[in-house]
Image: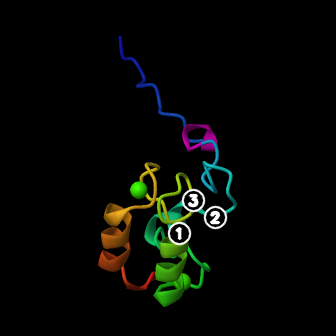
Amino acid sequence: MTATPTAFPTSATSRRANPWTADGNGVPDECEAVCRWDCGDGSGFVDTVDFLALLSEWGQVGTPCDGDDNGVDTVDFLALLANWGPCS
Ligand SMILES: [Ca+2]
Ligand SMILES: [Ca+2]
């Protein structure tokens, strides 16, 4: 007896439920990952504006420039510097 292999679902049901923005902040996650440190003005560049935004948020938890939700600190500062420039 020959059995026909069961096909994998081809519909969109196997895709992520919400590919747009999982955290509901309106920023596409795909862009958000790349532009994570464009946290000051969303200009598409990690630049001085974002650096100043990070400084203004220093010590605060859960702000746009707090990359790891433990308060804006040196780790976030160094990560911002490491991602300096266009988000592309
Ligand atoms: Ca910026
Ligand atoms: Ca942090």
Quarter of the figure that contains the N terminus: top left
Q: Which amino acid type is shown beneath numbered disc 3?
A: Thr
Is 14 part of what is drawn in magenta?
yes
Q: Which residue occupies 60% across, 48% down? A: 22
Look at the numbered disc 1 and give the secondary structure of its residue.
Answer: helix
Q: Which residue occupies 64% across, 47% down? A: 18
The residue to which callout 1 is attached is 31
Q: Nearer the viewer, residue 24 or 4?
A: 24
Marks 1,2: beta carbons within 8 A = yes
Is 51 part of what is drawn in magenta?
no
> Distance of mark 1 from mark 3, alpha carbons?
18 Å
> Distance of mark 1 from mark 2, alpha carbons?
7 Å
Residue 54 in the figure: left or right of residue 84: right
> Distance of mark 3 from mark 2, alpha carbons?
15 Å
The residue to which callout 3 is attached is 63
The mark nearer the N terminus, 3 or 2, is: 2
* Quadrant in the rendering for residue 76: bottom left
Query: Percent x, y for residue 36?
Result: 47, 67
The residue to which callout 2 is attached is 27
* Magenta range: 12-16
Q: Which amino acid type is shown beneath numbered disc 2?
A: Val
Q: Which residue occupies 62% across, 80% down? A: 41
Q: Nearer the viewer, residue 51 or 83?
A: 51
